[in-house]
Image (cartoon, rainbow, N blue to C red):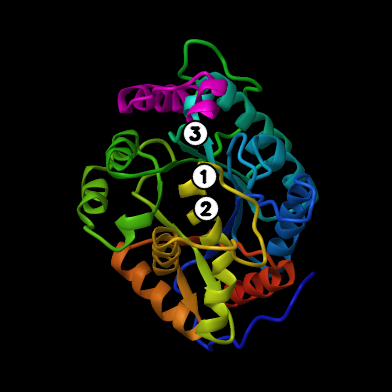
Amino acid sequence: MDADPPSSPKAALPVPVSLLDRSRTREGEPAAAALQHTVDRARRAERLGLRRFWVAEHHAVPGIGSGSPPVLMAQIAAQTSRIRVGSGGVMLPNHSPIVVAEQARMLEALHPGRIDLGVGRSLGFTAPVRLALGVERYDRARFAADLAMLVDYLHDDGPVTAMPRGVESPPVLVLATGSGLALAARLGLPVVVGGPILHGDLGPLLDYRRDFRPRDGQTEPEVIISLDVMIADTTDRARELLLPEAWAMAESRATGAFPPLRPDPPERLTPKQQSVVEQQLQMAVHGTAQDVLFELGALVERTGASEVLASTSTYDLDALAEVDAALAALAP
């Protein structure tokens, strides 16, 4: 459902706002319902005027319904008409570069000018998942080689032709840390950054901008910042909405299994788990619309970001709709 946002500030961010949705499963629902929730949310994001809607790749994780970004992207793009649809991201350890290139080209051919290809190098969540995927080790050198080959295929520079040929290359964006930033600079690719780098040493980002080598249509370095964002009428309410995700993270640290979102906390949180919960809350930008506008604006200025990619999630779907509307109200 669409919803009115919590009271919105009169000012706006200087950059566009987009959404990253991980198809979170919810306690009491079939896991497959998470996929329809994602598609519904993408349609709402388009009506709200958000710039992009990205989906993620996770395998054999009880709390996440999506294991195949291209399949979900195809459905979302078919159910929308204007919003950019992308992956946050396709994990290169799990796929041959030629397969990723052809999937991206197929999507671009079917939905011209609307597809983004975000890529990363994360391995499976646990050792059994990594074993099932057949990738237990994947070093920086392998990622660099696979990413360079993927870019070559998309620009018809590979040893074989990625089909269908004759379509525009969808932009490739790197979900980057320190080494990923250096690689993206060398290949002339935009980056998506999150986590501690947003609040810590900006050296790697400055190095990325300094060392960036223009390639094809990407003539300037570009940084998108990604983080959890939660908006409500009060800071306490925003914190409450963040808790289901924080509880899940704390539980995963203890059990090795990332669980579905739940409306109430586990029966008993150990001091260590409570510490994880607090860490998750501290990493998120949350509060009233005015508070969030101020914090995000400061991050944009500090990082020189061109866009905010919000990875907001909570158990209550109606509340999530309100948060999406509030985020859209912050956009220029």
Residue that label 3 marks: 126
Q: Position of residue 241 (x, y in %)?
A: 59, 72
Tell me the distance, in whole angstroms, between the alpha carbons under discs 3 and 1: 11 Å
Residue 141 lies, with reference to residue 226, above or below; the image says above
Please identify the quadrant where the N terminus is shown. bottom right
Asked if residue 236 is positioned above or below residue 69 in the image, the reply reads below
Magenta range is 126-153
The answer to whether mark 2 and mark 1 are in CB contact below 8 A is yes
Quote the CA–CA distance across marks 2 and 1.
Answer: 6 Å
Report helix, strand or loop for mark 3: loop
The image shows a total of numbered marks equal to 3
Q: Which of marks 3 and 1 is in front?
A: 1
The residue under the point 55% across, 86% down is 234
Query: Residue 253: horizontal and vertical position, in percent?
Result: 46, 48
Residue 255 bears which disc, if any? 1
| Crowd rating for badge 2 (residues with CA inside 10 Å; few <14, some 14–19, many 20+) | many
In this view, 153 is above or below 324: above
- Kind of residue indicated by mark 2: Glu
Quarter location, residue 211: top left
**Which numbered tag is attached to residue 251?**
2
